Amino acid sequence: MPIIAAGLAELRHGRFSFYPAIVGVQHNEWILRRASWTEILVANAKTSEEICIPRRFVGEVSSIEAPYRIVGLVKELEYREGVVFPHHRSVIEMPRAVNDFSRASLRPTPYQGSAGVVAIRAELDSDSRVWRVLRGSVAAGFLVCLAVIFVVRDAHLGTGFGWTSTPSRVPNLNAGDDYDSVLKKMGSPASDQWLDSRSGTGGYRRMWYPRRGVTVVLAGASRNRARYAGTLDRDDKIIQSVDAGLANELYSAPVIE
């Protein structure tokens, strides 16, 4: 299925589905109500229930309309008690088999009586002891590496839902940077969207970098002529701006009606 970097304007007059589907919602068919820089409001086509989804979780839109367009989500989401948040899959312990007894129950009952004294001669095997120490050191090092990986991963995945996150790193960008120069400094974004300005002239290009925790915004008359306007953090708040009108665009009326 071909994917194009497009805004949400194409969803105004039709139905679409999310991929992956939102956990907790049985019917994956939606209608776009409105969209702003910070969130989109969608209604379930079957139940008419409306939910808000933060824009940082919304990815690309498919170019195929049959039977519905597909809107990609950068994370698997879960809907519960009227709120959408990232879904965590829990590890379920397998139940014990019917005839599976604990090892303690298979141990013989200790004999109630005096036990005979058996002379045991301890023989030290230096080679076996060295191998045991070596295996223990390798296992300990492996566990330490796993712990470091999980800590770094959680730091990068932190969001406004109560996880621990690292501060957003502001890139070294200025008003003279265009799309090509942003790619050279920061690499390819996870998502690239173009939104029309509410004033009717030109628009804004959102480039989402989840590993850095920032969204780079370019502004201009068209997608290819846009220049650097500012940077947003994970909560879509402005942390750097060279465009005086950027704040008004971000926190005003929805872009799409």
Image (cartoon, grey):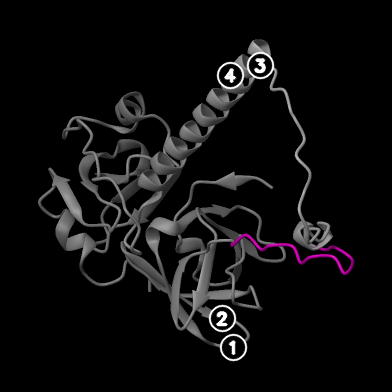
Quadrant hosting residue 28:
bottom right
**Label of residue 59 in the image:** none
Q: Nearer the viewer, mark 4 or mark 3?
A: 3
Q: Earlier in the sequence, mark 4 or mark 3?
A: 3
Q: Measured from the top left, where is residue 234 in percent x and y?
A: 30, 53
Q: The magenta stretch spans which residues?
A: 90-101
Q: Measured from the top left, where is residue 54 in percent x and y?
A: 38, 65
Indicate the amino acid at tag 3: Leu
**Label of residue 47 in the image:** 1
Q: Nearer the viewer, mark 2 or mark 4?
A: 4
Look at 15% across and 45% down and name the residue there.
240
**Label of residue 44 in the image:** 2
Q: Earlier in the sequence, mark 1 or mark 4?
A: 1
Q: Name the residue that disc number 4 marks.
A: 134
Give me the C-alpha separation between circle 2 and circle 4. Answer: 59 Å
Is the C-beta separation of discs 2 and 1 under 8 Å?
yes
Magenta-span inclusion, residue 97: yes
Q: Earlier in the sequence, mark 1 or mark 3?
A: 1
